[in-house]
């Protein structure tokens, strides 16, 4: 918990918190804090970087913008919203954290998250691991064939890609096709047994979206729109994202 | 399952009595569909492992602790902070004394698996689909990576 006393040298004015309040519904209630501490007492990130959610919010309120904007703690709060449901005043601290992340220059953001966000656009697949349309198709077809041959009850099982008009469009996290392809199979079997009319897409197939974690609003939206377009282009009714 | 299209039960675990708990992913439960989806999750898990073999963590559902894998923490290059964050999750799972933690989210799966390795816990970390297929007797040899020695040979397929 907080230990060091923070000295406020001059009458500071929070410009950062005011800016965040302008873009949040009800200003995220950021001015309503009762300092009760419920948020901090149930937050797993309390204690990291000598910080906790109440302290973070209070610092923002006191206009300690530089400290708030440079705190590495913004990358240690997972924006899980547990504090938000516990807070009697429904104060949206995770949204404050999101906007701190947003202000970090791209080159100083944690490089693996940033890199995974950017990598999604290397192909039209949204894969943060950079897997292409062809890579995905190859792995899915290869694995399917292997199982059709080895497990006779599933000789007719399908794992369609780009099936026009299928009811369900299923996203797939890149981790399976890239590092553990056999893990895709149990779900295929379940879909096969229930007779689901489903498909993957060669475009927009990857479920993950790291741009959300670096709080890059433009790229985050672009990622979602690429996926949504893939669903629409195939005329699917339901979009299933297993993330 | 409710429509009867997926015939699955917990007979396989009646005598084995392997204990399961379930992680409520923040993104799925607290941040989007709320407690009703947490109930659906329990309906599924109890059906496939047996009600008597299910142990809930405390707190749970919308009030569950985040595992610490979310928000990009797994990719942030801050493993010490991430594992410190995850200590509450590890203790929660340990307190259930479960043999398996079912994780319905990729980030949760990676983080909870890592917490077990790092803290030398005794539980295994599995996706729902693995246990569902195991229960139906259609889980092949190569689909058993995350099962522990107690289940790796149970209900083999093809038999
Ligand atoms: S729970 Fe809400 S009111 Fe209480 S200290 Fe935290 S932010 Fe302030
Ligand atoms: S959203 Fe952040 S501050 Fe709030 S409980 Fe979760 S980790 Fe803690």
Image (cartoon, rainbow, N blue to C red):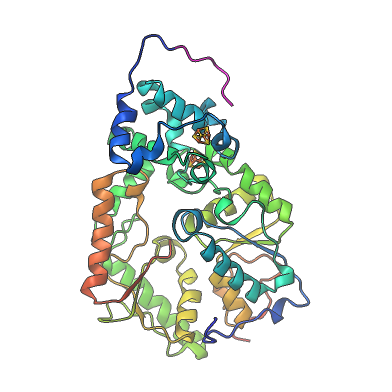
In the rendered image, residue A241, in percent from the top left (x then y), is placed at: 39, 65
Q: What stretch is highlighted in magenta?
A: A1-7
Please determine whether, in this image, residue B138 is positioned above or below residue B76: below
In the rendered image, residue A186, in percent from the top left (x then y), is placed at: 51, 75
Q: Is the magenta stretch mostly helix, strand or loop?
A: loop
Q: Quarter of the image for the C terminus of chain A: give it.
A: bottom left
In the rendered image, residue A109, in percent from the top left (x then y), is placed at: 35, 36
Q: In this view of the protein, can residue A97 be seen by the observer?
A: no
| Residue at horizontal 66 percent and vertical 55 percent from the top | B57
Front residue of B115/A72: it is A72
- B47 with respect to A123 (left or right): right
* Farthest residue, direction top: A9
| Residue at horizontal 28 percent and vertical 40 percent from the top | A23
Is residue B140 within the magenta segment? Answer: no
Please determine whether, in this image, residue A149 is positioned above or below residue A111: below
Q: In this view of the protein, can residue A226 be seen by the observer?
A: yes
Front residue of B12/A153: it is B12
Q: Quarter of the image for the N terminus of chain A: give it.
A: top right
Front residue of B38/B104: it is B38
* Farthest residue, direction right: B15
In the rendered image, residue B41, in percent from the top left (x then y), is placed at: 56, 67
| Residue at horizontal 49 percent and vertical 15 percent from the top | A6
Which quarter of the figure has residue A59? top left
Please determine whether, in this image, residue A149 is positioned above or below residue A74: below
- A126 with respect to A184 (left or right): left
Which quarter of the figure has residue B76? top left
Please determine whether, in this image, residue B29 is positioned above or below residue B14: above
Q: How many labels does the image show?
A: 0
Is residue A2 within the magenta segment? Answer: yes
């Amino acid at each position: 918990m907080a230990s060091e006393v923070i000295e406020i040298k001059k009458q500071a004015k929070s410009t950062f918190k005011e800016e965040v309040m302008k873009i949040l519904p009800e200003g995220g209630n950021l001015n309503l804090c009762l300092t009760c501490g419920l948020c901090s007492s149930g937050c797993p990130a309390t204690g990291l970087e000598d910080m906790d959610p109440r302290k973070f919010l209070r610092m923002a309120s006191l206009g300690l913008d530089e400290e708030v904007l440079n705190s590495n703690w913004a990358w240690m709060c997972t924006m899980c919203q547990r504090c938000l449901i516990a807070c009697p005043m429904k104060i949206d601290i995770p949204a404050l954290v999101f906007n701190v992340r947003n202000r970090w220059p791209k080159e100083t953001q944690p490089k693996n998250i940033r890199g995974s966000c950017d990598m999604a656009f290397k192909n039209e697949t949204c894969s943060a691991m950079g897997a292409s349309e062809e890579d995905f198709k190859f792995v899915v077809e290869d694995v399917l064939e292997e199982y059709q041959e080895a497990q006779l009850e599933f000789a007719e099982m399908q794992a369609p890609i780009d099936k026009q008009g299928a009811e369900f469009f299923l996203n797939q996290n890149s981790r399976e096709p890239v590092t553990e392809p056999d893990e895709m199979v149990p779900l295929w079997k379940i879909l096969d047994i229930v007779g689901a009319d489903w498909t993957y897409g060669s475009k927009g197939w990857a479920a993950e979206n790291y741009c959300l974690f670096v709080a890059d609003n433009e790229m985050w939206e672009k990622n979602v729109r690429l996926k949504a377009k893939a669903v629409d282009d195939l005329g699917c009714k339901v979009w299933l994202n297993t993330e | 399952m409710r429509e009867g299209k997926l015939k699955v039960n917990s007979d396989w675990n009646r005598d084995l009595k392997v204990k399961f708990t379930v992680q409520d992913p923040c993104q799925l439960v607290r941040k989007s569909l709320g407690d009703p989806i947490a109930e659906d999750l329990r309906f599924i898990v109890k059906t496939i492992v047996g009600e008597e073999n299910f142990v809930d963590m405390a707190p749970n559902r919308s009030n569950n602790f985040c595992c610490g894998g979310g928000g990009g923490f797994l990719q942030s290059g801050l493993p010490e902070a991430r594992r410190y964050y995850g200590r509450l999750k590890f203790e929660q799972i340990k307190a259930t004394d479960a043999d398996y933690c079912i994780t319905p989210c990729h980030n949760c799966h990676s983080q909870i698996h890592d917490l077990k390795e790092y803290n030398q816990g005794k539980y295994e970390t599995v996706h729902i689909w693995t246990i569902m297929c195991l229960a139906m007797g259609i889980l092949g040899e190569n689909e058993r990576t995350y099962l522990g020695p107690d289940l790796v040979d149970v209900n083999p397929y093809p038999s």
